[in-house]
Image (cartoon, rainbow, N blue to C red):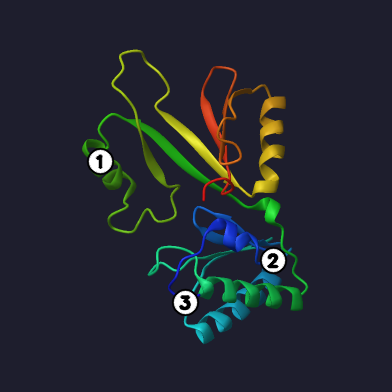
Amino acid sequence: MGSRQTMTFTEVEGLGLTDWRWLHGALHAHYASGGFAAGLALVDRIGELAEAADHHPDVDLRYPYVRVTLVSHDAGGVTSRDVDLARQVSAAAAALGIPADPSRLALLEIGLDAVDEAAIEPFWRAVLGLDDGSGEALPPVWFQQTEPHDVPRQRFHLDVTVAPEVAQQRIDAALAAGGTLVSADRAPAFTVLADAEGNRACVCTAAGRD
């Protein structure tokens, strides 16, 4: 496979990248460093590996953890470059005694019902600062096509994407906390839940989307 050829979720799942999970078309890992110094040591090592590979991940260093995201932006998805660097990062973390905890991985998207996406998207790009780069760390916003309607209803909803093995636990916890199951027709890709007042949210995974 060429270094610019993108891979599917199913292809990546078969490669044994135990530290990593596919979320929103990229590889993500969460390393439980337990402290800033240990996390910084891992970040330094990731930096060395990235420079050697000329392929640079997004790295988030916090006091108790390091999160790493790998995607080939020029190819528009995950490629063999990401897989190779993911394996090297895993080896570096293992050598430093820093374990991965995929159960801590989650990404948030905000969905907005839209009758005319083209008419409203420029507003949201402007207010979120997406055109000048200042909104890069904000949750992504996507527009769900709907028919015109007069009855007031929920316009925004949250999509929470987690690793496939975590989804049912998250769903069960939401139901136990007073939620209701609206639809599991598209599970495991997404399951629609609602709170006690009918406000909806989706628990999503990469499974079932290829």
Q: Is residue 203 above or below residue 78?
A: above
Taking the image as drawn, is residue 87 in sight? yes
Residue 35, percent across and down?
71, 65
Badge 1, how many Cα within 10 Å: few under 14, some, many 20+? Answer: few
* Mark 2 residue element: loop
Residue type, numbered disc 3: Gly
Query: Relative to residue 210, is residue 88 drawn left or right?
Result: right
Q: Which residue is mark 2?
A: 16
Residue located farthest toward the bottom when viewing the structure as drawn: 52
The label on residue 2 is 3
The Cα atoms of the two marked residues, 1 and 3, are separated by 39 Å
The foreground one among 112 and 40 is 112
* Mark 1 residue element: helix
* Mark 3 residue element: loop
Residue type, numbered disc 2: Gly
Upstream in the sequence, badge 2 or badge 1? 2
Residue 83, percent across and down?
58, 71
Q: How many marks?
A: 3
Badge 3, how many Cα within 10 Å: few under 14, some, many 20+? Answer: few
Cβ atoms at labels 2 and 1 below 8 Å apart: no
The foreground one among 144 and 184 is 184
Question: In which image quadrant can residue 34 be found?
Answer: bottom right
Q: Residue at x 23, y 40 (%)?
A: 118
Residue 207, percent across and down?
59, 48
Residue type, numbered disc 1: Phe
Q: Is residue 167 above or below residue 14?
A: above
Query: Relative to residue 134, is residue 32 drawn left or right?
Result: right
Question: In which image quadrant can residue 84 be found?
Answer: bottom right
The foreground one among 61 and 117 is 117
Q: Residue at x 40, y 68 (%)?
A: 75
The label on residue 123 is 1
Upstream in the sequence, badge 2 or badge 3? 3
